[in-house]
Image (cartoon, rainbow, N blue to C red):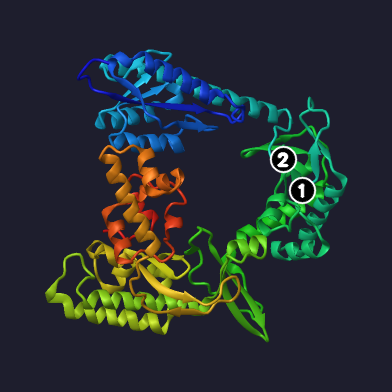
C-alpha cells in the first residue's frame, strides 16, 4: 500500500441457494469467502482491506432481496462502513435484473462499488455496469426459462395422471416403487374418507360433520418428514373437511389448477356419493353466510363481520349459542373454530364489543370536533353547525351501536387496545362533508381497553390510557444511539461489543432501533406507542428501512 493512499474497506458477500452441504466444516460459503479474500489480498497495493464481518446467506434464493446477511450488508453500506462489495459471481448477489439495478443505485448513493472475482467486472465504470446488466439479463432469462420448463413438465405429467408430489391426501400413500409416480390406497384412511363423505351427505353442514367426526375419533393424516418429525393426526377442522370433500383425487382424478384429468390411481369413492356431496356443497355456497338463521328464527346480526382482526392477523368470526331460548352472540378467533382450544385466541361477547366500538367512535369524533381537529382546515363559520351534526351522530351511535359498523373499515384488536380505521366517505355522508376534508388523525385512532379474560368469554373495560413509556424500550433505544455513535466515530464493531458487555447478536439486533423514524422514536419517549409494541415485538422481524412502512407496521397513525 502506497503512503497516503486511501484505504478501501472491502466486504465479502456469499450465498448458496440450497442448504445441502452447509453442515460441513468447509462448505460452499467458506469456499466463496476464501476466493474473495484472496482476491482482496491481491489488491493490497491499491489500498484494499478486508473487513472482519462476514455476510453469508445459506439456503436462500437469489431471486429476492429479503436475505438477513444482505440486508445487514446494505445497512453497513449506507452507514458508510463499506467501500467495496466483493462476490464470487454476480448471481450470488442477485439473479433479478430489476433488483440489481436497484442495488447499484443504492451503492452509488453511498459511494460503494461492486466487484465480481471470477468475472472481472467492476461497477465503478459505466462500461462495467453495462456489461453486468447484459450478463445479468442472461442469468435472469435462464432462471425464468428453467422455471417455465419445470412448470410445463408438471402440467404434462399431471395430464397423464401422474402424482407429482406434495402433501399426500388422506386415504392414500405413495407407491412403494419410487419409479411409479402414482398413489396407492391406505385402507384405514380410506374408511375415514368414505365416512366423512357419508356424514356430509346426511348432515349437510361442515360444523355438524366436524363435531361428529371428532366424536367418532376421526383424525387428519399422520405425516412423517425426512428428519423423522411427525405432524397431523389431529382433529379435523371445518376447512380441512371442506378441502377434502372438494378433492377429485377420491374419484380417481388428478387436479392441476382449475383442470382435472384421469389419474393412474384407484378411486376410493362411489361416483354417485361424490356427485351428491358436490351438489350439496354448491348449494351451501350459493346460500352464503348471510342467510344463516338462529335457532329462535332470527337472522344472525354480526355487524362487524369481516372487519375485525386480532394483532396476529387472524380474523374474528361471528358465532352464537342458544341457552334457555335466548341467543348469545360472540366474535371468536378463527383458529378457535378451525383448530380447537388455543389460550391466545379471543372470544368476545358481540353486543358488548359492538357497543365499545360505537361509543369509542362517538367519543373520538366529539373530541376531534370540540378541539377543532376534525377538519384538515378548520372552518370557524361552520363550527357550531358541525358540532351539532357530530353530536347527533354520536347520540345515534350510542343508542344503536350496530350503526357504527358501516363507518368502520377495520378494527384490529390487541392485548390492551383497539385500533379503528374509519371509512372517510361513510362518515362524510353522515356529517354532510366532503371525504377529503378530514384531518388524518380522525380516520385512524387507538381506543384503549382492558380485556379481563382471554380464550374464553371476555369482559371489556374501556378507558383512556395515560402515556406510559416502556423502560426496557427506552433503555434499548438509548443504547442503540450510543452504539451507532461509536461506530460512526470509527470504533469497530468488536470494540463496541466489548464496551457494551453484551453479546454480538444483542448489539446487532438492538442497534436497529436507532434507525426508527423520528415519529416512532418520539412515540417511544412519550410512551404513546400501542402497549403491545415492546422491544421484543419491535425486533421480532427485521425493521424496514422505509420510515412510512415502519410507522404503518408498528401502529403509528399517519402524520
Residue annotated with mark 2? 225
The outermost residue toward the left is: 381
Residue displayed at 44% across by 43% down: 504
Q: Exactly how many numbered labels are in the figure? A: 2
Q: Quadrant of residue 149?
A: top right
Residue displayed at 25% across by 40% down: 489
- Image-based side of 165 in relation to 121, left or right: right
Residue annotated with mark 1? 222
Q: Is residue 307 above or below residue 265?
A: below
Locate residue 412, reporting x and y percent.
45, 64
Between residues 409 and 536, which one lies in front from this camera angle?
536
Check disc 1 and report its element: helix, strand or loop: loop
Q: Alpha-carbon distance for marks 2 and 1?
A: 10 Å
Q: Quadrant of residue 98?
A: top left
**Does the image show residue 409?**
yes
Check disc 2 and report its element: helix, strand or loop: loop
**Does the image show residue 169?**
no
In the rendered image, the quadrant that contains the N terminus is top left
* Circle nearer the viewer, 2 or 1: 2
Locate residue 97, reporting x and y percent.
39, 25
Between residues 444 and 35, which one lies in front from this camera angle?
35
Residue displayed at 34% across by 44% down: 545
How would you rate the neighbour count of disc 1 (Cα within 10 Å): few for under 14, some for 14-19, many for 20 or more? few
Locate residue 408, reporting x and y percent.
40, 67
Between residues 201 and 223, which one lies in front from this camera angle?
223
Locate residue 33, reporting x and y percent.
47, 23
Q: Is residue 171 above or below residue 449?
A: above
How would you rate the neighbour count of disc 2 (Cα within 10 Å): few for under 14, some for 14-19, many for 20 or more? few
Are the residues at dot 2 and dot 1 in contact (C-beta closer than 8 Å)?
A: no
- Image-based side of 387 in relation to 267, left or right: left
Amino acid at each position: 500500500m502506497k503512503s497516503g493512499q486511501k484505504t478501501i474497506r472491502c466486504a465479502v458477500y456469499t450465498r448458496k441457494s440450497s442448504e445441502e452441504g452447509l453442515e460441513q466444516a468447509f462448505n460452499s460459503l467458506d469456499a466463496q469467502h476464501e476466493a474473495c479474500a484472496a482476491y482482496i489480498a491481491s489488491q493490497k497495493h491499491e489500498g484494499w482491506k478486508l473487513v472482519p464481518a462476514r455476510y453469508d446467506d445459506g439456503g436462500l434464493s437469489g431471486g429476492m432481496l429479503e436475505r438477513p446477511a444482505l440486508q445487514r450488508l446494505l445497512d453497513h453500506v449506507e452507514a458508510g462502513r463499506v467501500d467495496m462489495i466483493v462476490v464470487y459471481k454476480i448471481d450470488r448477489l442477485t439473479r433479478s435484473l430489476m433488483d440489481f439495478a436497484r442495488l447499484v443505485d443504492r451503492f452509488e448513493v453511498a459511494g460503494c462499488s461492486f466487484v465480481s472475482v471470477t468475472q472481472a467486472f467492476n461497477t465503478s465504470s459505466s462500461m462495467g455496469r453495462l456489461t453486468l446488466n447484459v450478463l445479468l439479463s442472461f442469468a435472469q432469462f435462464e432462471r425464468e426459462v428453467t422455471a417455465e420448463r419445470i412448470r410445463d413438465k408438471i402440467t404434462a405429467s399431471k395430464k397423464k395422471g401422474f402424482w407429482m408430489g406434495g402433501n399426500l391426501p388422506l386415504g392414500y400413500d405413495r407407491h412403494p416403487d419410487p419409479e411409479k409416480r402414482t398413489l396407492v390406497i391406505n385402507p384405514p384412511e380410506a374408511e375415514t374418507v368414505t365416512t366423512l363423505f357419508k356424514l356430509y351427505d346426511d348432515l349437510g353442514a361442515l360444523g355438524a360433520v366436524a363435531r361428529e367426526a371428532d366424536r367418532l375419533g376421526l383424525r387428519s393424516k399422520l405425516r412423517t418428514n425426512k428428519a423423522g418429525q411427525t405432524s397431523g393426526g389431529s382433529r379435523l377442522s371445518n376447512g380441512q373437511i371442506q378441502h377434502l370433500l372438494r378433492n377429485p383425487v377420491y374419484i380417481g382424478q388428478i387436479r392441476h389448477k382449475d383442470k382435472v384429468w384421469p389419474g393412474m390411481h384407484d378411486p376410493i369413492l362411489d361416483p354417485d356419493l361424490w356427485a351428491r356431496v358436490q351438489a350439496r356443497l354448491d348449494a351451501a355456497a350459493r346460500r352464503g353466510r348471510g342467510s344463516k338463521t338462529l335457532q329462535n328464527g332470527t337472522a344472525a346480526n354480526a355487524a362487524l363481520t369481516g372487519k375485525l382482526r386480532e394483532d396476529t392477523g387472524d380474523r374474528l368470526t361471528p358465532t352464537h349459542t342458544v341457552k334457555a331460548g335466548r341467543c348469545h352472540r360472540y366474535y371468536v378467533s378463527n383458529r378457535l373454530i378451525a383448530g380447537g382450544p388455543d389460550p391466545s385466541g379471543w372470544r368476545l361477547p358481540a353486543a358488548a364489543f359492538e357497543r365499545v366500538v360505537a361509543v369509542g367512535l362517538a367519543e373520538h369524533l366529539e373530541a376531534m370536533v370540540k378541539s377543532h381537529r376534525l377538519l384538515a382546515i378548520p372552518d370557524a363559520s361552520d363550527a357550531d353547525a358541525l358540532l351539532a351534526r357530530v353530536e347527533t351522530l354520536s347520540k345515534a351511535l350510542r343508542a344503536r351501536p350496530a350503526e357504527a359498523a358501516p363507518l368502520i373499515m377495520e378494527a384490529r384488536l390487541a392485548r390492551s387496545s383497539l385500533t379503528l380505521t374509519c371509512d372517510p366517505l361513510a362518515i362524510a355522508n353522515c356529517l354532510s362533508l366532503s371525504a377529503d376534508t378530514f384531518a388524518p388523525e380522525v380516520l385512524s385512532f387507538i381506543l384503549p381497553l382492558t380485556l379481563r379474560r382471554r380464550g374464553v368469554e371476555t369482559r371489556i373495560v374501556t378507558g383512556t390510557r395515560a402515556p406510559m413509556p416502556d423502560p426496557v424500550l427506552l433503555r434499548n433505544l438509548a443504547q442503540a444511539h450510543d452504539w451507532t455513535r461509536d461506530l460512526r466515530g470509527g470504533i469497530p464493531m468488536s470494540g463496541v461489543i466489548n464496551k457494551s458487555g453484551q453479546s454480538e447478536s444483542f448489539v446487532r439486533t438492538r442497534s436497529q432501533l436507532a434507525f426508527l423514524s423520528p415519529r416512532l422514536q418520539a412515540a417511544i419517549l412519550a410512551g404513546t406507542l400501542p402497549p403491545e409494541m415492546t422491544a421484543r415485538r419491535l425486533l421480532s422481524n427485521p425493521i424496514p428501512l422505509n420510515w412510512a412502512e415502519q410507522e404503518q407496521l408498528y401502529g403509528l397513525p399517519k402524520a
